[in-house]
Amino acid sequence: MLACGAVVLLLAATVAQARVDPARLSAAQSAAARFMQLAKGFETTGQVPRESDPAVRPLLDMVFDTSDVTGPVSFQELTPLSQRMVTGAQIGTVYMLAGTGTTDLAGLANDPQADAKVNRNVVRFAPEMGRFLDFELVVQNAIVEAVLVQLASAKPAELARPNFQSGLASIRQGSLRTVASVIETLTVDGLSDEWRRSRLPALAGIAPRLARFLEPGQRASLEQLALACADAMADPSLKRSLQAFARTVAGG
């Protein structure tokens, strides 16, 4: 999710009309800072600001707003866009870790109950988590599109540079992790099928670009995960949509 920052140093710049509002980053960071103040102590109290609170909803609206991400993102915009993703992840992490005793996902690394604790929070804070996951997918989709455009226009000598290739590998792995985590979340017990269906448009939106961007082994891994998730769904429309996602990612 955070690997896209490497693009700034490792990919050659292209000239493109700006599509991302540069003012959104500072506004999102300010909103996130205010949210974090309201959430202070969440790791021990288990209490976090909810979007149903009139004082909180505008903060989440600002952080998770992707209305300006409407077209191809230029090279110059990738850094602020990736920083917006980091800002959104701050909020998502608060909801995932409420009451777990830690403020960092790494803090759960040795906790045998880590998955159960996070999953309970996903269900408890389903409205906010849904917004966060959709935000992640939309931003990741824009990043992948920008890199695909760059790959199509880069010169062979640029593509062959070791640092270019290592940066590209990092972005691919980050994209895979982001999308896989969303698909895995769909299987969490306690979430409604309506909530799950609401995540499908963002997943469908990124699938065609993943098919062109990921390595064959990564595509196969994501295809298998989506099919396994589809098998776990009782709702026929969810099954069909996840199967369609798997076919698209696989290049079918």
Image (tube, rainbow, N blue to C red):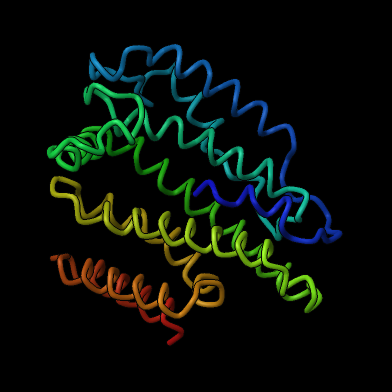
- In the rendered structure, the answer to whether residue 3 lies left or right of residue 99 reads right
Q: Position of residue 31 (x, y in %)?
A: 55, 22
Compared to residue 14, the image places residue 43 above or below, namely above
Compared to residue 240, the image places residue 39 above or below, namely above
Compared to residue 128, the image places residue 5 above or below, namely below
- In the rendered structure, the answer to whether residue 185 lies left or right of residue 203 reads left
Residue that lies at the very extreme toward the bottom in this rendered image: 252
Please identify the quarter of the rendering in which residue 22 is found. Answer: top right
Please identify the quarter of the rendering in which residue 150 is found. Answer: bottom right
Residue that lies at the very extreme toward the right in this rendered image: 15
Please identify the quarter of the rendering in which residue 50 is found. Answer: top left
Compared to residue 237, the image places residue 21 above or below, namely above
Q: Quadrant of the C terminus?
A: bottom left
Q: Position of residue 1 (x, y in %)?
A: 49, 49
Q: Camera-side residue: 105 or 66?
A: 105
Q: Total number of numbered labels?
A: 0
Q: Position of residue 135 (x, y in %)?
A: 48, 46
- In the rendered structure, the answer to whether residue 174 lies left or right of residue 25 reads left
Residue drawn at (63%, 64%), measured in percent from left and top?
A: 145
Q: Camera-side residue: 243 or 3?
A: 3
Residue drawn at (25%, 74%), measured in percent from left and top?
A: 227
Q: Position of residue 12 (x, y in %)?
A: 79, 61
Residue drawn at (56%, 59%), measured in percent from left and top?
A: 171
